[in-house]
Amino acid sequence: MSLDKLASEIESMAKAEAKEITDDAKAEAKRISGEAKESVKEYREAAIAQAERMSEQVAVESIAAARQGNQKRLLVARRAELDATWSTVKSECHPSMENRGEVLPFS
C-alpha cells in the first residue's frame, strides 16, 4: 500500500467520522431545541392558566366588594331613615298626648 493511498484512506475515514459526529450533534441539537420549545410551551400554558385563575378570582372579589359596599350603603340609608322617622315621631308626640305610651313604648 502506498503512502498516498494510506493517507487518502485515513482522510476518508476521518471525514466519515467527522460527518457522523456532526450528524449526531445536529440530531442532538434538534432534540434539545424540541425539548426547549415544548418546555416553553408548557410554562406559557401554565402561566396563562394561572393568570386566568387570578383574573377570575379578582373578578369574584371585586363583585363581592361591590355588593358589600352596596349593602352597607343600603343599611346606612335605612338607619338614617329610621332615625329620622324616630325623631319625627318623638317630636310630634308630646308628653301630654293621649295614648302616647302606645306610640312610644320607651317614653
Image: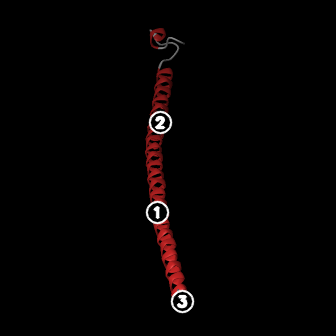
Separation of marks 1 and 3 at Cα, in angstroms: 43 Å
Instruction: Relative to 35, say whether 8 is above or below.
Output: below
Judging by the rendered image, the residue that carries numbered circle 3 is: 2
Farthest residue to the front: give it: 1
Which numbered disc, 2 or 3, marks the residue closer to the eye?
3
Badge 1 amino acid: Arg
Identify the secondary structure beneath mark 3: loop
Separation of marks 2 and 3 at Cα, in angstroms: 98 Å
Separation of marks 2 and 1 at Cα, in angstroms: 55 Å
Category of crowding for the residue at label 1, using alpha-carbon neighbours closer than 10 angstroms: few (below 14), some (14–19), many (at least 20):
few
Question: How far from the left and from the top, in percent, is residue 48?
Answer: 44, 53
Residue name at image x 47 percent, y 11 percent: 100
4, 19: nearer the viewer? 4
Judging by the rendered image, the residue that carries numbered circle 2 is: 68
Instruction: Find residue 31 and name its label.
Output: 1
Instruction: Relative to 84, say whether 56 is above or below.
Output: below
Residue name at image x 47 percent, y 59 percent: 35
